Image (cartoon, rainbow, N blue to C red):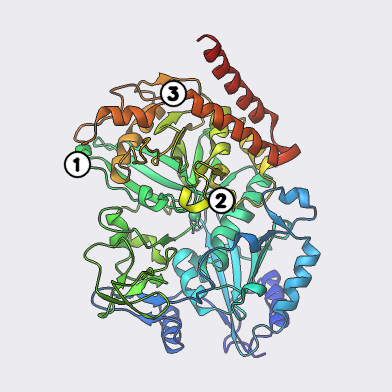
Amino acid sequence: MTSSPSAPPSTNQHLLSWVTEMAQLTKPDHIVWCDGTEAEKQRFTELSVKEGILEPLNAEKLPGCFLHRSNPNDVARVEHLTFICTPTKEEAGPTNNWMAPKDAYDKLGKLFDGSMKGRTMYVIPYVMGPLGSPMSKVGVELTDSVYVALNMRIMTRMGKAALDMLGASNDFNRGLHCTLDVNPERRFICHFPQDNTIWSVGSGYGGNVLLGKKCLALRIGSYLGKKEGWLAEHMLILGVESPEGEMTYVAAAFPSACGKTNFAMMIPPKRFKGWKIWTVGDDIAWMRVGEDGRLFAVNPEFGYFGVAPGTSNESNPNAVTTVSRDTIFTNVAKTPDGDVWWEGKDGPIPPELIDWKGQPWSSKSTEKAAHPNSRFTAPAQNNPALSKFYDDPAGVPISAIIFGGRRATTVPLVMQAFNWLNGVFFGSTLGSETTAAATGKVGVVRRDPFAMLPFCGYNMGEYFQHWLSMQSKITNPPKIFLVNWFRKSKDGKFLWPGFGENMRVLKWIVDRARLRVGGQETLFGWVPRAGDLDLSGLNIPSEQVDEATNIDLAEWKNELTSLDEFFGTIGDTMPKALKLNRDLLLARIEAVEAAG
Ligand code: OXD
Ligand code: MN
């Protein structure tokens, strides 16, 4: 092993001895400490192009943009290979895969042993959250992948700034990643919450290897949040500005691939002249209670790792602008003139393309040209709607929390919880209904509580309890809402147009949070009364909106039965308060039924 020509740019003994220990294990030929400079980016990019890891794109159409094609067996997060390695299985809980820490260190240690021979180890110090914020955390990722280094540079505050923030402290997340031979048999993503450590092998896919994102900001983050009294959530953060300049911040949790990025970058429809949405974050929120008892949120990330297919000027014009420069595209298709393409992109389908696997593709082909989970990694600063407070160390005060699932039935377009307990109940019930095509059974709900099922780093029942316990700390709490853009009519058509039109729902939410609009009380929460939602200029019959906001007691009875089963799977840690809330709702329905 040889070290880089210059000495490590840190004198932090904890860091230095850990890097040495990991280098002794993985035995790289070279160690490169990343400084986060432009010159370094240039060097890494040139190297990546030389080694065929990145392909340059049309520099006029897409300045500073590159294409990466992953191994076709490595295109998504691998939930079945993702482990929470706590001393006991109970700590990981029934919704996580578990491995004993010693077994995991032994098993992965064997895979890491000598894994970087002939390769370079990149040392990537990074900060999740605004520099200097008490809410932020430092991590260091060691990786043999220059693609990871370039992506981390976009997704985090990386390099010297992170070392400066760390100083001589031992409080940093220790991340180790090696791509190995990208063999699914030798692929594991292991989290050691008690050690603040992540070991990832055998994958090059973002969610598995950009360790600041899902691994640190959510799985380890949620564990730290429980321990330290804050919340690490799978939530976008946005600011709603009224024509008068009034600003209201909202955090919203939706399961993966339910349009968080679109919602966070939304452009209000014409009817909402003067209204503006500002993006603080599109995927993750870290929230702490401020001195005034409000909840303050920061986005720990510095860029967007978004799903490309479906991104267009219709669905998300701000994302189209965001990815027009300095972006790394992964597994999208390429046009003959070096532009990118994916299903659902603007304009006609090009007759000929190079598909995501690098093969010629024609419009007659039955295969997708871009992988359905193809991605863009783009800097936050590219977003025309970026909030000027996205980097504020204090975070932004949250007035409303929104939970949303993908439900064809039952869940109304929008409903406000009566109180914190009801709101936590909403969060615990989130889920998506499967379609006949996917499972053979219509209406089967896959629960994804708080959109955190794949990302909660400890026992889900304790996570629910942590949310309940936060109530006593948040003396000035945000209002909590449940939304569902995906409700369908009996004949299977979406009842609500979604996208920018969601502004109409968001406006009601803002007005409710500011106590200035009415609502109709139902058994489960408040819904908008006829006339509360601004529907002007929206070309859909009002009965359709009534159907979208309707509460159907028979559907809710089924829902509560399904919830009973789900809560049962959580076991002993399931908070009684949530179970009782469910029982109470059932009793209320039965009382209504009995009354005839
Ligand atoms: C996800 C993502 O899978 O954000 O949720 O990539
Ligand atoms: Mn996500």
Quadrant of the drawing holding the N terminus: bottom right
- Label 2 secondary element: loop
Near-viewer residue (392 or 512)? 512
Q: Position of residue 21 (x, y in %)?
A: 73, 77
* Residue 304 falls left or right of residue 465: left
Circle 1: residue type: Lys
Circle 3: residue type: Trp
Q: Residue at x 29, y 27 (%)?
A: 543
Where on the picture, by quarter, is residue 346?
A: bottom left
Estimate how packed mark 1 is, as few (under 14), some (14 to 19) or many (20 or more) residues with alpha carbons within 10 Å: few
Residue 270 is tagged as 1
* Residue 325 falls left or right of residue 54: left
Q: Is residue 127 above or below residue 274?
A: below
Near-viewer residue (421 or 244)? 421
Q: Position of residue 246 (x, y in %)?
A: 31, 35
Estimate how packed mark 2 is, as few (under 14), some (14 to 19) or many (20 or more) residues with alpha carbons within 10 Å: few
Q: Residue at x 59, y 49 (%)?
A: 453
Residue 186 is tagged as none
Disc 1 and disc 2 in contact, CB within 8 angstroms? no
Instruction: Report the residue marked by disc 2.
Output: 134
Q: Is residue 32 above or below residue 498?
A: below
